[in-house]
Amino acid sequence: MHVLFLHHNFPAQFGQIAARLVRSEGWRCTFVNEKVDGLQGDIDCIRFRPTSGATHHNHYCSRTFENQIWRSEAVVAALIDRPDVRPDLIVAHSGFVSALFLRELYPEVPVIGYFEWFYHRADSDFDFRRDLPLPGPAEAMRLRVRNATLLLDLQNCDAGYCPTDFQRSQFPTEYQVKLRTIFDGIDTGFWKPIGEKPRRVAGVEIPEGHQVVTYVSRGFESMRGFDKFLQVADGLCRDRGNLTVIVVGEDRIAYGGDNKFTGGKSFKNWVIDRRDFDLSRVHFVGRVPPDELVRVFAVSDLHLYWTVPFVLSWSLINAMACGCKILASDTGPVREVIREGRTGHLADFFDVSAWRAQANAMLDSPADFAHLGGNARQVVSERFELELCLAEMKSLYAATIGS
């Protein structure tokens, strides 16, 4: 079996799946992406290079679509130069690039689409943060056409899948029949509790007797509640003299339009400049490798997670697999995995006082909440473990090829 994976990034959602298929099944896996070329472990990577993209001459609302078309055309050009690639199946992420044009190169090869998010104008990530400057009319109009390539891919694919039920529910009802829910997979042999807590992680020395609160996000942005987190962390540090806060992530905006109102500042700096925060025990450690992130979760006495109604972060599932006690935002994607009082606790996204009170309660009486971490890991083992997800994907692959 030869599977052609397509994603603008690498390894992204497909890297660990491709590696397992090569090692365990003896399949050939080719990974077309915009980042790396050549053999990456057991995976044959082909880099595509767009020769152009959207400019200011393009309408503001159509620039995303223009860029997607240029990338998708570049994928075909890269594969024309590799006549040895004759896949039995194409598995393609729909977002920054599309498998649409691959029908011209491989007309008989079935296509499975991986769909993360469908954009909505109202009651969604777009308008959830009503406490911040809302996007303007141009952004609203642009959002209405951002689904153009997604809709083409939904129509073009033979089958598709989404990582969570919540994400699947965002897609038009008429297409949901094409979509299964299959998570990307968590290696619970890697993401796990490690026993005795280290006293130094990610360059931070944890003082004797200190409790640790953790927060993890790819970027520090409003979509992941960074501003609310910082207010809660500041309050907890003022309440508790024996607290260390570890913040993992980068000072950048990965999602959303925070840069539209921050006046040229990063969202992190924009937030910090607006309040008198006590950051003396809040440690920003940057991006850390996976093995170090396991250690961060190991020292965590309480992990805090926010998200607007949007794609669920891998970091939350990783924290659950590591047995963390979790306090998270009471939003749609989170409620799918965090069950109140069983696998964690939930708080209103905007209610900083409620977060602060619940966090203090969980830190005051750790024994009363000890069951949360074990229950959270059990959920990951039963629903999101890599081998289980891989088996579901292989079933989808077989059904698609046979259809």
Image (spheres, rainbow, N blue to C red):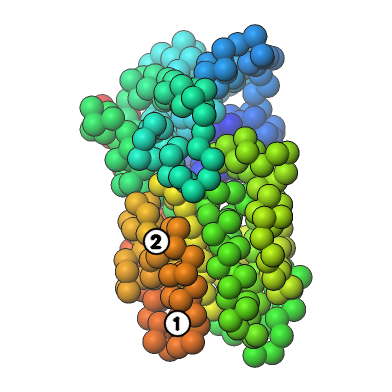
Which quarter shows the N terminus?
top left
Q: Quadrant of residue 399?
A: top left
Q: Is residue 289 above or below residue 80?
A: below
Q: Is residue 292 above or below residue 211?
A: above
Asked whether residue 116 appears in the rendered view, the answer is no
The circle on residue 22 is: none
The 10 Å Cα crowd at callout 1, few under 14, some 14 to 19, many 20 or more, is few
Of marks 2 and 1, which one's residue comes earlier in the chain? 2
Query: Which sits in the foreground, 229 or 395?
Result: 229
Q: Is residue 174 above or below residue 28?
A: above
Q: Where residue 12 appears, x then y in whole percent? A: 56, 43
Q: Quadrant of residue 60?
A: top right
Q: Secondary structure at mark 2?
A: loop
Please name the amino acid that badge 1 sits on.
Ala
Q: Secondary structure at mark 1?
A: helix
Q: Where residue 392 appears, x then y in whole percent? A: 33, 47
Q: Where residue 216 appears, x then y in whole percent? A: 58, 60
Asked whether residue 238 appears in the rendered view, the answer is yes
Question: Residue beneath label 1, please?
Answer: 361
Q: Where residue 121 appears, x then y in whole percent? A: 39, 31
